[in-house]
Image (tube, grey):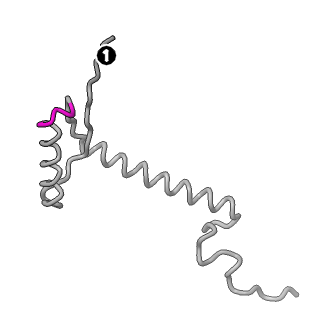
């Protein structure tokens, strides 16, 4: 039985303006993949998708921080320097 496999390699292109060595290394790697016929298609992910990924990661981090704050029952979360266990002493009640 024969099977058909198509390999698509997706990558975010490194900007030569901001990181010339990284862009050069990436180009060498992608040319080597093509020359070795290791992939059928190399698809560059657009900057819009790369930006979206960064935003998704930021939201995920904020979600974890919010969960930590809820679980610690303190708005700043358990790792904040202002958590109740290290806050300034309270004034004595009257």
- Residue at position x 69%, y 59% from top? 71
- Residue at position x 12%, y 54% from top? 24
Residue 48 located left or right of residue 77: left
- Residue at position x 42%, y 48% from top? 56
- Provide residue 25's location: percent of width, then percent of height: 15, 54
User: Is 37 one of the magenta-colored residues?
Assistant: yes
- Residue at position x 62%, y 66% from top? 77
Quadrant where the N terminus sits is top left
Residue 5 located left or right of residue 29: right
User: Is 50 one of the magenta-colored residues?
Assistant: no
- The extreme right residue here reads 94
Magenta-drawn segment = 35-39
Identify the main secondary structure in magenta.
loop
Label 1 secondary element: loop
Relative to 93, say whether 16 is above or below: above
Residue 93 located left or right of residue 89: right
Relative to 34, say whether 23 is above or below: below
Residue for badge 1: 3
Q: Nearer the viewer, residue 76 or 36?
A: 36
Relative to 51, say whether 8 is above or below: above
- When asked about the image quadrant of residue 21, the answer is bottom left
- When asked about the image quadrant of residue 22, the answer is bottom left
């Amino acid at each position: 039985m024969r099977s058909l496999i198509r390999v698509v390699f997706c990558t975010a292109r490194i900007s030569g303006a901001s990181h010339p060595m990284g862009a050069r290394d990436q180009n060498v790697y992608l040319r080597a993949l093509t020359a070795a016929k290791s992939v059928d298609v190399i698809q560059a992910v657009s900057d819009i998708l790369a930006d979206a990924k960064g935003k998704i990661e930021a939201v995920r981090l904020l979600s974890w921080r919010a969960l930590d704050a809820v679980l610690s029952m303190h708005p700043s979360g358990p790792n904040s320097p202002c958590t109740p266990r290290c806050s300034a002493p309270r004034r004595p009640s009257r």
